[in-house]
Amino acid sequence: MRNQPISVAKAKKAITDYKKAVGQPEGLAELSIFYCEEVFVFLGYCGMDDEGYFDALVRMFEQALKYVMALPEAKRSPFIDRLEQVALQGRNVGWGVGEDMAILLSGYDIDD
């Protein structure tokens, strides 16, 4: 990963391209949650001190939550479990990430 540029825009573009090409709600939920999960994998390899990076993470988390809540109730549970795990990880990074994620979850009556 050394000397490789970090591009939130490229990662988000992949999700946008999927939305334009296929647009299946379940696939959008999967991709957006995967993005959030992979941020924490990335942070395990290196530190990040960029508020914009964490703001983008919270925005993607919010989008993932919206995609999940638009699914039929019977399909939501595994996605909600993953979002709760992401929110737990968010508590460890600072910048208010964990708090923001908890607020977003509580807006849908989901406790992390």
Image (tube, grey):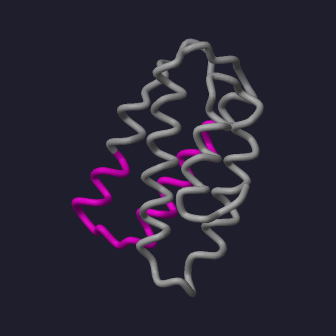
Q: Nearer the viewer, residue 15 or 79?
A: 79
Q: Which residue is drawn at 66% across and 72% down?
A: 78
Dominant secondary-structure state across the stretch colored magenta? helix
28 w.r.t. 93: above or below = below
Q: Which residue is drawn at 45% across and 33% down?
A: 56
Q: Give the range drawn in magenta.
A: 14-39
Q: Where is residue 2 in the image (x, y as percent from the top left)?
A: 62, 15
Which image quadrant: the N terminus?
Answer: top right
Q: Which residue is drawn at 69% across and 17% down?
A: 47
Which image quadrant: the C terminus?
Answer: bottom right
Query: Splitting the image into 4 quarters, where does residue 12 fall?
Result: top left
Q: In the visual, does 5 lie left or right of 103?
A: left
Q: Residue at x 22, y 59 (%)?
A: 20
Q: Position of residue 100 (x, y in %)?
A: 58, 38
Query: In the image as oriented, which residue stretches furthest toward the bottom?
Result: 74
Q: Position of residue 32 (x, y in %)?
A: 48, 53
Query: Splitting the image into 4 quarters, where does residue 67 fall?
Result: bottom left
Query: In the image as oriented, which residue stretches furthest toward the left?
Result: 20
